[in-house]
Amino acid sequence: MLRQYELVERVKRYDPDADEAMINRAYVFSVQKHGSQKRASGDPYFSHPIEVAGILTDLYLDDQTIVTALLHDTIEDTLVTHDEIESVFGKDVARLVDGVTKLSKIEAQSETERAAENLRKFLLAMSDDIRVLLVKLADRLHNMRTLHFIKNEEKRRRIARETMDIYAPLAERIGMYDFMREMQLLAFRELEPEAYDSITRRLEQLKEGGGDKVARIASGLQMLLGNAGIRVTVSGREKHPYSIWRKMQERHISFEQLTDVMAFRVITDSTEDCYRALGIIHQKHKMVPGRFKDYISTPKRNGYRSLHTTVIMSENARIEVQIRSREMHRDSEFGLAAHWAYKQSEGKPDGQAGWLRDLVEILEQSQDPDELLEHTRMAMYQDRIFAFTPKGELHQLPKGSTPVDFAYAVHTSLGNQTVGAKVNGRVVPLRTTLENGDQVDILKSDGQEPQPGWLTFAITGKARAAIRRYIRHKQRDETIALGEKLFEEIASRLPVEVGEKAMKAGLKRLKLTDRAGLMIAIATHRVTDGEVMEALIPGSTSGEGAEEAHPRQHNPVSIRGLTPGIAYQLGDCCHPVPGDRIVGIRRTGEPIEVHTIDCSSLEAGADADWVDLAWDVKSKGGTARLSIIVKNQPGALASVANIFGANKANILNLQLVNREGPFHTDIIDLEVQDAAHLMRILSALRSLEIVVQADRV
């Protein structure tokens, strides 16, 4: 803990005109008022505000801010009043202390309201005077440093999550990267302890194995630039565990696959020297394409300026290099705090960040907590959304996420049992895109299971992996069951009953490992009936060999590009109709498959022969498949059928494939004249009030 004279000396070192007497009074005042109060660590409570004040001296903040830090908990945690602070330390200090105090007095009832109200007061106080935000960030940073003393694990995780979701992004938003990195690291250690320990151990192993590798590379850069006549200071470090973990998550790679775990900072005297240094480094070392960023010519919204590049060193190591001037470096360390001079008599910042002004306008007009979160969090996370459970639990999701993604984010079993969703109290289709601040209530049923159609709109890796895994298992079970039924029919044609010995011998002849594999092979037509019979009971087909497959039915529509009389079949996956751009896939021994040019099945035919095809000018008539989401109300299907009738289109098949509360999804096979005819029908369907969505499959 800082002694009184040490704190004063720190402030006087960068601000000789600071009010030394006021700082001394505040130090003694805080110690006396907090008295015998203790922290979770067992230390005297007054050690906390003193340490917060010490953190703020590193930002070179004025005497009023240091005094505010010393007093920031007195109104909330002691008998001190606002009037008392104003009488002893003046109106400005009392206003700042009151601003910080307001951030802690959250009286709303629900979890969502608490989060929103906290953010509201946080930003409103910050907009009034940036120093309130700086004190609060320093307060949170010191609390995170001592978080491990709290015995309640749930409370520790709540504080860590709040830090990761709100405080660290705010520190980043105003350019205080040192605060942001330390908050993220401490929160990461609490939220993902196993990942933290694993990455930390591996970084230690790298240090032991590589010796002074960081120092050698830094020295090499220093010498390279010094020989070119550029005066620089070069420092290097391993990236911190949270940064490494986040890259592993984003790129879906292991620690061993990471190539840039070291970062180096080159500090120059001027902007011109930054670009000179960049050119010299790129001349000497190969640049990794796509990893160069020029934040000097195009600064970040928070004012951050620097050149970023990644190069391959002679030791075959990728390193990240940041090049900036000394002025830029100070800005990056202290962010907006570096631009405000509080020694002026006005005691007001001389400018405001544009994003902050926008948020303040939203806050002043917003009364609803959900609306508040929608806007404020959107400003901090451009590519993420935040949605809440009915109990107020916060979940981060990528932009474009749906209720299905949300359900799997809460728990895999909830995702698997999802049958519908309410967003902000209103029932919506599962493909609805979620917005910031949405409250999502997932409707579930024990009898429900994931649907293959969910893969068309679920976007998170966790949701898509869980859906695919479930579908694979289900499809395997269904395929085996189908194979068993077909096998019974095959076995009935054999002259003798198939025993265990015959089954083992048959599997060996067919090069299959078990009975399940045989059933799958039968169901998927990888083996013919005759092959199965011969494998189980040799000679049972009377030497006729494997049975021939049933002849395929061929569509009589005329297609240019095919030899007259050659067999072909229209793809069941895309259902091409005259007017579509088409292509053929030729495989040995098979009829030519005709697909639309954008059919996803073409990826599987990349190694086959492709045939350039076109419809004959006289070709008319084809079968198109439509997917229609319709409101579940009387007369809905009749309205859809009327559209088909009015457009002289014949329904060949109609199937209800999914029901989601007040909506149902139908797959309809429709006989149409050509692609233009189909588009007219789709346009008419989309104009109906009862149709939510209409697409060609």
Image (cartoon, rainbow, N blue to C red):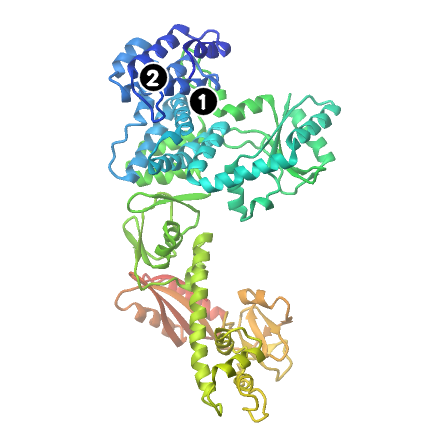
Compared with 377, 28 (above or below) is above
Residue 78, x across and y down, in percent = 26, 19
Judge the density around disc 2: few (<14), some (14-19), many (≥20) Cα neighbours within 10 Å.
many
The residue under the point 45% across, 61% down is 469
Residue 107 lies in what quarter of the image? top left
Residue 157, x across and y down, in percent = 37, 37
- Rendered image: mark on residue 86: none
Residues at circles 2 and 1 in contact by the CB criterion of under 8 Å: no
Secondary structure found at label 2: helix
Residue 140, x across and y down, in percent = 39, 27
Residue 377 lies in what quarter of the image? top left
The residue under the point 41% across, 29% down is 144
2 or 1: tag closer to the N-terminus: 2
Relative side of 168 to 226, left or right:
left
Residue 660 lies in what quarter of the image? bottom left
- Rendered image: mark on residue 351: 1
- Tell me the residue that label 2 is attached to: 71
Q: Is residue 620 visible?
A: yes
Numbered-mark total: 2
Comparing 611 with 245, the one in front is 245
Relative side of 687 to 77, left or right:
right
Residue type at numbered disc 2: Leu
Cα distance between the residues tagged 2 and 1:
26 Å
Secondary structure found at label 1: loop
Residue type at numbered disc 1: Gly
Which quadrant, please, contains the N terminus? top left
> In the displayed image of the protein, which residue is found farthest to the bottom?
542
Q: Nearer the viewer, mark 2 or mark 1?
A: 2
Comparing 137 with 360, the one in front is 137
